[in-house]
């Protein structure tokens, strides 16, 4: 353990230091309250033994300042040394944040007991922190699994909705636009009927991976599989024109896969239809307005023959 000994009596301090070092601990020394605070702020020890009458701040104020430095100083066992303590002083000491007292001259056996107790608390605290850290890691992993679409590995509908709600309110605070793209694989039902459901699943995986790769480097973009063969991409801070360019980029990336689809009514390979919408969150009441607007764009793209995109105008969004 690293133990701080703060004692104004030189002879008494030297005896404490020698005794504690003999037991195999590392000892740091301080002569004033200011030195104690400085050491705690720099790298707080594992145990503090300090004179109640240390020069500088009074003992109670010193205890309060140590606790207020935060971090490890909130937890470190703190024992006050003194010739005597009245009942009222003991109550004040506990209220200030100290853990115990030792009366001078300090008995080696009592000192060893206090150090052993502090060491045990330190080990328990480290074990608790270790378990807490492991739980955080496991929880994050579970959240990642829960947020993933089991087939494609990209985000699922729930994670996309959460991102949309989060970014929506962020956009309201910053007064910046937010855009959404909805992609749909053209004539996917016919693909499954022709090539089989297993082949259809492979197409979904390939399309998802293609969209994911094409989005690399695009700041804050969120990709998710909404349902079936429909994917969504959330683009915070993107205006209409910039979002549509992203839509075209993703559309072209999937088109370049050139996956054969002889049952398609608009091409000889897998293609996408997509709708793009942009809104100013300050003029709408809920984030789902954005999704509805993009869905309208997807409908328009399909209505115009599929294998294309449609950019919803500001006037159409308002409607």
Image: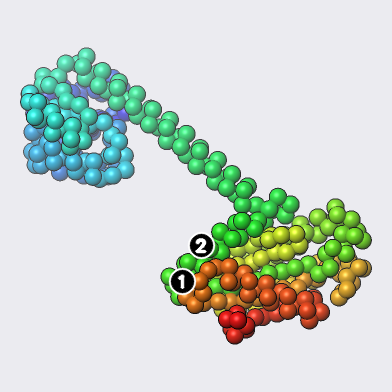
Is 242 displayed left or right of 93 in the figure?
Answer: right
Label 2 secondary element: helix
x, y percentage for residue 99? 22, 29
Residue at 73% x, 75% y is 299
Residue at 10% x, 42% y is 57
Q: Is residue 179 above or below residue 66?
A: below
Q: Which mark is residue 172?
A: 1
Q: Please identify the quarter of the rendering in which residue 193 is found.
A: bottom right
Q: Is residue 20 above or below residue 212?
A: above
Between 128 and 13, which is closer to the camera in this rendering?
128
Q: Residue furthest bottom?
A: 315
Q: Please identify the quarter of the rendering in which residue 125 is found.
A: top left
Q: Is residue 32 above or below residue 89?
A: below
* Residue 188, visible in the rendered structure: yes
Between 265 and 46, which is closer to the camera in this rendering?
265
Label 1 secondary element: helix
x, y percentage for residue 154? 67, 56
Residue at 68% x, 53% y is 149
Where is the C terminus found, in terms of image quarters?
A: bottom right
How far, Cα to Cα, is label 2 from label 1? 10 Å
Residue at 75% x, 59% y is 228
* Residue 243, visible in the rendered structure: no
Between 53 and 304, which is closer to the camera in this rendering?
304
The reply to whether discs 2 and 1 touch (Cβ–Cβ < 8 Å) is no
Q: Which residue is mark 2?
A: 166
Colour scheme: rainbow
Q: Earlier in the sequence, mark 2 or mark 1?
A: 2
Q: Which mark is residue 224?
A: none
Q: Is residue 268 above or below residue 141?
A: below
Are there few (<14), some (14-19), or many (20+) residues within 10 Å of tag 1? Answer: some
x, y percentage for residue 89? 9, 30
């Amino acid at each position: 353990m690293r133990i701080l000994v703060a004692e104004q009596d030189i002879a008494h301090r030297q005896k404490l230091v020698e005794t504690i070092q003999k037991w195999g601990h590392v000892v740091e020394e301080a002569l004033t309250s200011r030195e104690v605070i400085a050491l705690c702020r720099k790298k707080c020890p594992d145990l503090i033994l300090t004179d109640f009458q240390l020069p500088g701040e009074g003992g109670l104020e010193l205890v309060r300042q140590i606790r207020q430095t935060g971090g490890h100083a909130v937890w470190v066992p703190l024992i006050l040394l003194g010739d005597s303590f009245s009942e009222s002083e003991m109550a004040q000491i506990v209220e200030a944040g100290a853990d115990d007292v030792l009366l001078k001259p300090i008995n080696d056996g009592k000192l060893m007991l206090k150090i052993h107790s502090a060491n045990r608390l330190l080990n328990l605290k480290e074990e608790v922190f270790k378990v807490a850290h492991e739980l955080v890691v496991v929880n994050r992993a579970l959240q990642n699994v829960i947020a993933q679409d089991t087939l494609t590995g990209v985000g699922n509908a729930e994670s996309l909705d959460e991102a949309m709600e989060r970014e929506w309110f962020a956009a309201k605070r910053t007064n910046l636009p937010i855009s959404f793209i909805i992609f749909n694989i053209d004539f996917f039902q016919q693909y499954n009927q022709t090539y089989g459901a297993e082949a259809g699943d492979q197409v979904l995986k390939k399309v998802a991976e293609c969209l994911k790769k094409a989005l690399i480097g695009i700041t804050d973009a969120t990709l998710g599989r909404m349902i079936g063969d429909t994917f969504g991409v959330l683009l915070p801070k993107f205006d209409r024109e910039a979002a549509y360019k992203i839509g075209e980029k993703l559309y072209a990336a999937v088109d370049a896969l050139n996956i054969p689809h002889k049952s398609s009514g608009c091409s000889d390979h897998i293609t996408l239809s997509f709708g793009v919408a942009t809104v100013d969150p300050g003029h709408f009441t809920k984030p789902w307005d954005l999704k509805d607007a993009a869905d309208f764009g997807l409908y328009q793209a399909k209505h115009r023959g599929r294998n294309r995109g449609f950019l919803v105008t500001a006037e159409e969004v308002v409607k």
